[in-house]
Amino acid sequence: MGKRVDWLAHAVLGVGVLFFAFPVWLVFAGATQTAGAISRGDLSLLPNFHRIGTFVSVLRAPGVGTGTPVWHLLMVSAGMALAIALGKIVISLASAYAVVFFRFPFRMTVFWTIFITLMLPVEVRIIPTYAVMSDFHLINTFTGLTLPLMASATATLLFRQVFLVVPDALVEAARMDGAGPFRFLKDILIPISSANVAALFVILFVYGWNQYLWPLLVATEPGLDTIVIGIVQLINTGGMMTPWNRVMAMAVLSIVPPVAVVIAMQRWFVKGLTESER
Amino acid sequence: MTQLVIENLAKDFGKGTVLSSVDLKIADREMLVIVGASGCGKSTLLRLVAGLETPSAGRVVLDGRDITHLDPAERDIAMVFQNYALYPHMNVFENMAYGLKVRRVPKAEIARRVDEAAALLNLAGLLGRRPRELSGGQRQRVAMGRAIVREPKLFLFDEPLSNLDAKLRVQMRAEIRRLQRRLGVTSLYVTHDQVEAMTLGDRLVVMNRGHVAQIATPMEIFERPADTYVAGFIGAPAMNFLAAALSHGGSAATLADGRVIPFADGRRDGSDGRHLTLGIRPEHVRPMPNGMRLMVELVEPLGSETLVHGRLSDETALTVKLSGGGFGAGVLDIMPETAFLHVFDAETGLRMAPSAADVPAALAGAE
Amino acid sequence: MERRAIFRGRLLPALLIAPQLVLTFLFFLLPAGEAIYFALTRQDAFGLHTHFVGLANFAALFADPGYLATVLRTLLFCALVTLAAVMVALVLALFADREIKGRGIYRTLLIWPYAVAPAVSAVLWAFVMNPDVGLLGRKLNELGIPWDYTLNGGQAFALVTVASAWTLVSYDFVFFLAGLQSIPRSVIEAARLDGAHGFRRVRTVILPLLMPTTFFLFITNLVYAAFDTFGTIMALTQGGPGQSTETLVVKAYRDGVLNLDLGGSSAQSVVLMVAVIGLTALQFRFLGRRTVD
């Protein structure tokens, strides 16, 4: 079957791919060049593979601006992303289970209370949230960095949706088999929802990793700086003397973990994104 | 010895009564089939016995133990669900073993029971498969196996064959019957399919709008339906009904066109002129010159038999089942065989038996 | 929609739901309540006395031409980012949905930017467009086109818009692709039999069927452009030069955190809350979210 090649489609998609890849490629190539060359404007788009070691030395060495080593910034980001993703999954799984599989007074009130949080992103309550955090002495703590971001309506609503379409008969069969609520959750419900858990994990990991405003507010100590915070600080304080090649290496390093998670778990990611947000 | 007694069981949902005051007794090793149209309360009755619903009134007693308010898990009852409700993430072995695992049955014992049930159900080679890798019939057997390994006192079947295609359904029907006999487990079986009910049940419970219309053996129900609902529900094609009035001192019925049909089995109580509904099955109508005129509307040849649908002169629809073929359109003169006539009260729909004093000696024993 | 099969018990569900309720109360409802409280009060310079001022903070806010300019600027910014992202994503999705070789690879290459933090995307764009170190930024100046977004407000606004849309495209792309794939093949085939080809088929059959997705994306993109671009803007321009890239969230942050104007910043927060609630309500009204029935 001699199919005609769809040149137009390849051209359009190729331009799209380049549009996305270009800035990252440029930064990657820049990271392998000397700081002087970049400052002079001699930035080449061909990476100098002999200087690929910049990435390793950036990891080890203290950060360029704040003095915190880059590997430490990455660890804080990873810790934050994992804690938020796992915490959110556990918390929302539990609350969705309660709302769907039990009948208790004020069930709908509880549901709407959770639902309302959809409409209150951090950005709209910057100051009072900071005040609350400071009242609870959560400023500059890892708990403060992660705990408040663990409650979200989106994940709860997704799990609720997933649980609602579990056939009644499956629950009843488990009850006839003698499974109580805990066993049902552990043996049946979580295993059959595992694809949704994976999907949610990708989205929440990226969400946690990419936080900017929240760590900016809550963590002012360098020890709690995330990689995103670290880079933005460098960019804003940088000048002619800044070793730009090292900053570029840092930027590449900051992108690698979330991009790797999205690409490796692409199938679940697409499913999770389209199902959780609608 | 397992005996299930249901006393005065009732269920109201918010909107109304689904089940009102049902009494049933199921004997040891008996297969009792509950049959009725959708919404008649048959599934609710089964779920009440299973413990999946809480009754509004009444008791469920299994072997002398009141289980009305026990959790399903504590009842020693197993259930086969309509859509099988197999756990999609477990293989066949795990599906069957789960109920035993939860009950902390020793591993060796679980393996023994599952292997035994798998052999019985021809599932031995499929124990490692997931439900989605099985055919409909195989899933059905796994659902049965899950119930069997529990070795319960009572089996509940909730329309277990309704998701299979016609051929497989007939095959599985026979298999269920064979297994139930062999294992000797007391069973309660719910279906909307009258053929399934007739072939499977030791006794049938015909339900109508939350009430029990009749409890009897399949043949008893076929031959002496308790009311017009049961008469119309059991038997295919359905029984024909004709409006009539009692006449000749209770020994005959007069149809709307004045034709007199004498009762073969004796007189009915009541004064002449009492409104009746006469029932006659399609197979009990014969062609007869100068009989009732049937304007034929549709002829369905079934091979060895032919179904003729038409209308009488008063527009009453009537179906006739005739042996052989070659019947064409036009007019057919017919008469009911009076020996197979069913007489019902037109108002209550209840069956009117011949009055006791008048029953011929030969029939008295059978009645 | 209600389940029929449920478990009994009161304590267990209460325990299961407690963590989420506690977090929701402490970090969502309490701050939102405080925002309203602060918005209605004013503190003296030392933060010792607080007194109730009614709607005075709001009155001051809406009397401030700077604030109104920020409102308009934010609206323009949101509209441009949304339009750009939705249109680019739609075109890419339409072509990626065609039966071409390597479309799986194309998809992956168009989806990954979702994972780039808004703030980091700004850093990437800075390296492209910065007049000193950026490759293209320098080239423009060498070619005699004066380019410096740190001084030129219009250029800053344009750059922030592009960088913000850049991160949104892959999000929209995923949804459009899912939307395209959910269109039944039979509908497309019927259109083919009716003789609708190429762009005509897209315009008369596919676009109408994508309307719910498009509408949903418009709302979510507006919300994203209004709130999640904070990192992008802070990393690129910090709202400057002047106020030329200052959105409502950037202003609320600056007034509250940097200038410590509690009442004014809280009043801004309350206005933003009302805006989000309005947008969410709009989404429900016209889309009927599946999650609530």
Image: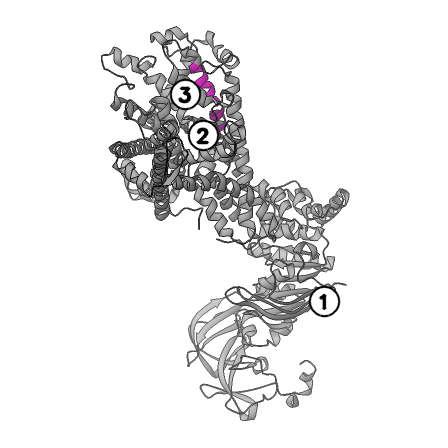
Is label 2 on the same chain as label 1? Answer: no
Q: Residues within 10 Å of mark 1 (few under 14, many from 20)?
A: some
Residue B127 relative to residue A241: left or right? right
- Whether the residues at callouts 3 and 2 have beta carbons within 8 Å, the answer is no
Cα gap from disc 3 to disc 1, whole angstroms: 80 Å
Residue at image coords 50%, 65% = B15
What secondary structure is marked by label 1? loop
Q: Amino acid at mark 3?
A: Val
Query: Would you name the residue on which mark 3 appears?
Result: A232
Tell which subunit mark 2 falls on.
Answer: A
Q: Kindly indicate the quadrant of the structure image that contains residue B196.
A: bottom right
Residue B49 seen in the figure = yes
Residue A44 relative to residue C156: left or right? right
The magenta region covers A247-262
Which mark, by number, is residue B27? 1
Query: Would you name the residue on which mark 2 appears?
Result: A214
Cα gap from disc 2 to disc 1, whole angstroms: 70 Å
Residue C255 relative to residue A262: left or right? left
Above or below — where is B258 with respect to A59?
below
**C220 vs A28, nearest the viewer:** C220
Q: Residue A257 in magenta?
A: yes
Q: Residues within 10 Å of mark 3 (few under 14, many from 20)?
A: many
Q: Amino acid at mark 2?
A: Trp
Q: Kindly indicate the quadrant of the structure image that contains residue C274.
A: top left
x and y percent of residue A57 in the render? 50, 11
